[in-house]
Image: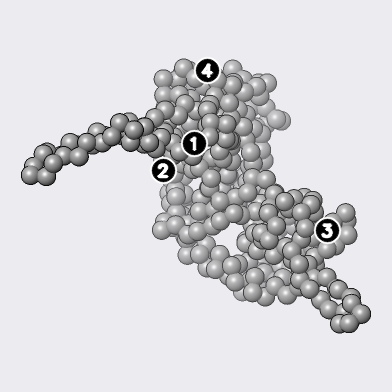
Amino acid sequence: MKTRSLIIPVILLVFFLSLAFSPYLVAAKKNQQEKNEEEETIIIPEEIRSALKQGLAQRQGRQDIPFSLAKHLFLPARENIHSIFLFKMKNQDIGFTPLELPPIPEKKEGKEKKTETPPEAETEKPPAPLQTSLEVFLQFHRLEKKEPAEIFKEIYIPLNLQAEGASYDPEKEEIYSTAYPLPPGDYLLAMAVASLDLQRIGTLYYEFSLPDLTQAFQELDTTPIFFVKGMKRMASPEITAEIHKDFFTYSVLQIEPKTENVFVKRENLDIFYYIYGAQPKQDGMFDIVVNYEVLKDKEPVIRFEEISYQAPIISQPLPMKKTVVIKSEKEGEKKETRFLEPGTYTLSISIKDNVSGKSSSEKIDIEIK
């Protein structure tokens, strides 16, 4: 299957990131320099600090406000690594209450007769919007021999959420994200979500490692591979830690990821990842080739044409179509393109860096419904 037209999003992505990374990285570097020159004041209430410390040794989370980590991703940011944490919270656990709307001013009676609202009309008003406010705290501990050695960074993020009353589902788990640039190393994230009065506190703990993406030339590898639901460009990069519902930000990109590799029939796989360990040519460009295959029970059902990339950051749509040969007595053999039927498949990715000669491969299970 030819994929020449699919290279366009990659070119656009590289263009966007080449424009955006300079101010983003300068700002990140400036923030780090300011931190070194003057110690930042981070206020974490003693109740939160005590709750995080209490479960630290056993990595035992507190469940006053239950939440869980859905996925950890990371992408390059020159000196640091953009670390992305996707977590889940159920609506009924985070205290949504009706939003108090300002009263509608009464119209003064003039020459026209005032029309009274029938009592039955009042009962037909749509449900009021809902709101909740929480406080989120992050502690990044450096790990030495799998034990916390020091607190590298502490972050406080206020979280204000609203929901439509008509579509509100108390049982639904929503996806939220937060991100922060960190140097390479081994870490333990201690995270707390609390009510404003700090009477309800939820905590979780997550160990992770970040490779040095700028120096990792011993082998070819990728950052965590994920699939994208939607992606758009923002006016400017986000340089402070925030929490977002359904998406995360990366440089000037707003990316809505899939947390589960489940697709509907006729939906493309829009894959996103970064290849590290590849070496640039003398002109600074890369020469990387990737082969994508979709397997069913270890047998290939789709083979895409080999794709060449001049940059190691990859955003690639892959249509889930296969070519089948149909035989008939009247028409003989003819080829048809069909979408994959529902079922479980494996996406196989083979990567080769033509400059260094190194290669790597990945396999990802997917499901089509």
Q: Position of residue 74 (x, y in %)?
A: 61, 48
- Residue that numbered label 3 is attached to: 295
Query: Which residue position is annotated with label 1?
Result: 168
How many numbered callouts? 4
Q: Which amino acid type is shown beneath numbered disc 2?
A: Glu
Disc 4 residue type? Ser
For marks 2 and 1, give the one nearer the viewer.
Answer: 1
**Residue that extends furthest to the right in the rendered view of this protein:** 329
Residue 250 x/y as whole percent:
52, 52
* Disc marking residue 50: 4
Front label number (4 vs 2) = 4
Q: CA distance from mark 4 to mark 1?
A: 34 Å
Identify the residue position indicated by label 2 in the image.
Answer: 34
- Of labels 4 and 3, the one closer to you: 3
The residue at the point 64 percent across, 45 percent down is 259
Of mark 3 and mark 2, the one earlier in the sequence is: 2
**Relative to 271, is 334 above or below?**
below
Q: Earlier in the sequence, mark 4 or mark 2?
A: 2
